[in-house]
Amino acid sequence: MNESTPVLSLRTRELRWQRVRDLMRAHDLGCLIVGGLRGREHYETYITDDYVEGVVVMPLEGEPTVLTWTGSRISRAQESFSRGVEAWVTDYRVGVSGAATAGVLREKGFDRGRIGIVGLESAAPGETTGFIPYPFWKELTQDLSGATFVEVSDPFSEIMLVKCEEELALVRYAAGVSEKTCRVMLEVTRPGVGEEAIYAEIMREIFRHGADARYPSLNLHSGPHNISWGPPRWISRAERPRRVQKGDMVQAEIFSCYGNQEVQVQMSIALDPIDEVNRRCEDVPRRSYEIGCKVLRPGITFAELVSAMEEPLRESGCWAKTPLVHSLNPSGWTGQTSVNMEQLEGLPEGRLEGKKSPRKKVRKGDLVLCPGMVFAFEPNACIDTHRVNIGGSVIVTDTGCEELNVLPTRVQHVK
């Protein structure tokens, strides 16, 4: 970290607040509750440039109020302000219950108005039913029985999708950190090394650059044919990490995050010699990635992008376990595919995955892509229990696509 590390200015705050208030006017809202709490996407940061695991109450006119669960989060912010960091919001308070939030709304005169809420029905990985707790919601609605609440998670998410230049500088920085982590992973991954050593070096590199890793921090798996995904099991239970061997595919999904701007990369390392099935799978995601970069441009829909990236799967007979592409900051637009899923009929993996209806494979596919949107390209190809996954993050530009990563966009081979 140094003085050239990018930060956000008050210009970005004014742009974000204007977008939020335009949304409020469009939905006839006098006030807005934006949840951060323990949600994955940290929505509150869009207004505050701070994450205090709380909520923000933002009126259509006037200053927002930040509610957090502990005074330590407030003293942390005050210390930054004392060092010269520009404060986006100055009204911080302890108390993040539904009753406390209702009290702030009454104080601001919105106890009988139309109030928007973000986080009740949001959709992010692991949050299929939002993240606003029931006790919070029960207290809020009982204390403000005369108010009308309007769920606006989706439209709020959509205004976050288009990044200004200052935000894109944070995205590029995070992508640069991810590229460095991929280099470290490539250097440390050799036969006989434990998965825990690879995991530790990746995380060390992220933290060394003043970045963080957004949930689930790091997915890492190894083996000649390992169809599983997610954080390694030894993170959450007493299970010995595996030592990687020749013939393995060692694959990681890395969630580097800087300034609340997340990027994702899918790093795959082949410990040669790998078998013929893995070699067949290796070519497919690379072709899908190249097609995505060629097709991505303003004006097409998200569904059209996903359809184009599916073509190598159709031609090869492979299926995909995870989405081929999804949005970033926030991550609610997901391009899952049902291509060739019928080959899993009767198999254990087929029972786990279920039948992916073509009507449901792409979430919010009618989104029209605009310059400044950021996506994670993560094409993957599976044959039975073999799986190869590659990819990096990209930005939609005025004319097409800006690729942010190199190493993880193809399989890297070592002996």
Image (cartoon, rainbow, N blue to C red):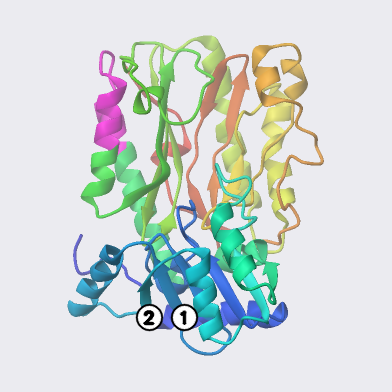
Which numbered disc flags the more N-terminal residue, 1 or 2? 1
Labelled pair 1, 2 in contact (Cβ < 8 Å): yes
Q: Residue at image x 63%, y 62%?
A: 153
**Kind of residue indicated by mark 2:** Asp
The residue that label 2 is drawn on is 91
Residue 393 position, x and y percent, is 48, 49
Mark 1 neighbour density, 10 Å: few (under 14) some (14–19) many (20 or more):
many
**Kind of residue indicated by mark 1:** Pro
Which of the labelled discs sits on residue 64, or is there none?
1
Q: Residue at image x 32%, y 50%?
A: 212
On-image quarter of the N terminus: bottom left
User: In the rendered structure, does residue 28 fall within the stretch colored magenta?
Assistant: no
Q: Which residues are magenta?
A: 183-202
Q: Considering depth in this image, is 359 or 268 the residue closer to the camera?
A: 359
On-image quarter of the C terminus: top left
For residue 287, what is the image quadrant? top right
Q: Considering depth in this image, is 250 or 139 the residue closer to the camera?
A: 139
- Tell me the distance, in whole angstroms, between the alpha carbons under discs 1 and 2: 7 Å
Residue 282 position, x and y percent, is 53, 24
